[in-house]
Image (cartoon, grey):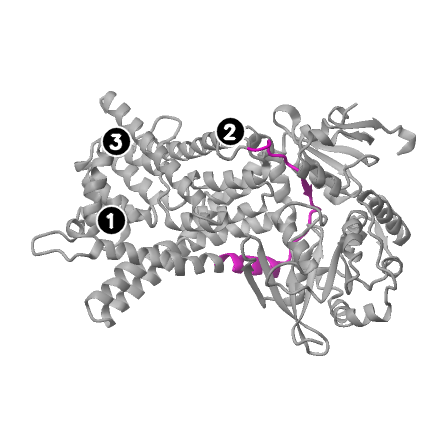
Amino acid sequence: MTLDALPPGRRARITAVDWDILAPEEATRLRALGIDKGAEVEIAHRGVFAGKDPIALAVGRMTVALRRSHACAMQVEELAEAAR
Amino acid sequence: MSAKRIAALVGNPNAGKSALFNALTGARQKIANYPGVTVERKAGRLILPSGEPVELIDLPGSYGFDASSPDEEVTRKVIFGEFPGEAQPDVIVLVLDASNIEQHLVFAQEVLELGRPTVVALNMVDLAERDGLVIDPEALQQALGVPVIPTVAVRRRGLAELTGAIASAEAWAERDPKDHPRPHITLPERRLAANNIAKGAIISETRQHRLHARMDKLLLHPWLGPPILFALLFIIFQAVFAWATPFADALEGVVGWLSEMTTQFVPAGFVQDLLVQGVLAGVGSVVVFLPQIVILFFFILVMEATGYMARAAFIMDRLMALVGLSGRSFIPLLSSFACAIPGIMATRSISDPKDRLTTILIAPLMTCSARLPVYAVIIGAFIPAKSVGLGIGLQGLVLFALYVAGIVGAMAAALVLRRSVTKGAASGFIMELPKYQLPRLSDLLIGLWQRAWVFLRRAGTIIFMVTVVLWVLLSFPRAGPGESQVDASIAGRIASGLEVVVKPIGFNHEMALALIPAMAAREVAVSSLATTYAVDADDEEAEAMALGDKLAARWSLPTALAFLAWFVFAPQCLSTIAVARRETNGWKWPAFMLAYLFAMAYIFAGITYWSAVALGL
């Protein structure tokens, strides 16, 4: 499942990121914010207008806004309730 | 020890560096630009306990040394001592957000690898505690090997301890010599180490109901968030236009009084004319916008300092994406409704250079307050004050249509520009949403003063020079007897040439003439039309009234509408062009901006004129 499809409020771990489809500066920025393989994330909010874009992603103690196109490049696996 | 030591504040964005900088230096700050880049260099004086002054610089926030934004580039070069003309800082003050400790420790390790004398300010410990997070500074100090001082910059806590640590940072570094440089490790390794260091330093962590999460639930709510934002924008607009009026009137009074005094005490002749008609009239017409700019900036600073601005960008991002921009362009464009100058300056927060350039190029299309006097006169003279039903007046509707025309024009321009001259990768939007904070009034006031000062300095230099040049063009050569001064002047002759160009779109000679001094600022068009039609009236309102009657008698409706359409697009503001030159580091883009906006003005004024004529208006 890509991060884009993760229902809001569920925790998930990023299992793979296709960095090649992202612009190099954006890849650098995402990594610098800790959005990388292995990070545990949760969609906190989504935009209102068409496409529910952008996405507010909770990662660590931060909330980071990013676009759906970024989320589509990330594979996630949902964490079981017990792991929360 | 050398005479002038330098300490630099370094840290991630949103670490509270600016608040700490204000707290440590007070209002004794100097803001300049780093040469060759449009990154602000903020420096101030910090007095050590020994009485020795240290120059403290506030470096732009950075997530890492490999980042690519111009801001972060400056930070990297200054820390490495590679920035030309800038000495390498003697002491690094690493500012960490205690409430986001794992993330901030990642960049911290990169900085500590350099082995420079460093002091860590563990900032915002109160916010961390509010979130139920307690950190042991001693344990952090052990792990990092440099002094760690807990601070709360906005509450002025921990400042004396921090200053003391800065004073002894070099001594500390010598006392604890690193026999081997710290190993350079990769980003994932740093992140892992950051998590481990944090784990060791966190005393207790209770997951409380976090205030910022609750506020986001409301402010980023799918259906409530946008109406809240628009309501706020409406209040800001109301404030900018309503609250500013008494102050603007007072400033106008002062300028009027100065002109009177000058007329009285300076002997009549060249110098008096230059001072009164050139300097005071020109600079005065710009300075009266200061109250609006101060009020607008007050709201913008509050939105920034509380953390709401990032949420506004989040809400607007999708709409901006439709024309190839991102949520970050929203704030500069919002500012441009008061004045394009602060708007263009605010584009500095846009990291993508193509995005930033596009935003600068379309900012002048937002209906700034200088257009209002022009619109008011023409609408008052040509649009009947009748109702179109539902209590909506036709005049107000036309004014609203002009605002909408500007916004639609800007969006269309952005769409075309992003597919042509500013073509690039689809602009992304990656932005940390900082925690909500209650700002300190003195920090707001310092920011407000700095913005106002930048604006006034510009009014005092560029605008001053331009108005003087225009005055000379209008005053020379001197007219012979029986000849009007404007017709005889250089500007008058240029107007005759210009008339040939603007005749097809319905403009007459007087209008062509008014366009020339209006290059300085749009509202000058009103006063120069007034001069040309030789209306005598003592205050501006009466002038506007009387002028309206004259215009109604002399212009046809299509001509008047074409004139309105012209001012929706025409980049008639030299200060905007000057600031665009400064922000784009050259004449290429301001020249392009002039060309495309004048082309749009000409085409749309033409279309308006021809269709109005065809409709028999």
Say what amino acid the circle numbered 2 marks. Arg
Question: Can you tell which quarter of the image residue A5 is in?
Answer: top right
Tell me the chain of label 1: B
Numbered disc 2: what chain? Answer: B
Percent position (x, y) of residue B609? 27, 28
Say whether disc 1 or disc 3 marks the residue closer to the N-terminus.
3
Q: Do the dots labelled 2 and 1 sit on one chain?
A: yes
Q: Quadrant of residue B369?
A: top left
Name the residue type under label 1. Ser
- Residue B295 image offset from top left, x and y in percent: 49, 52
Q: Nearer the viewer, mark 2 or mark 3?
A: 2
- Mark 2 → mark 3, Cα distance in angstroms: 29 Å
Give the structural element (helix, strand or loop) at label 1: helix
Name the amino acid, label 3: Ile
**Residue B419: image tag:** 2
B185 up-or-down from B259: above or below: above
The residue identified by callout 3 is: B505
Mark 1 = which residue? B528
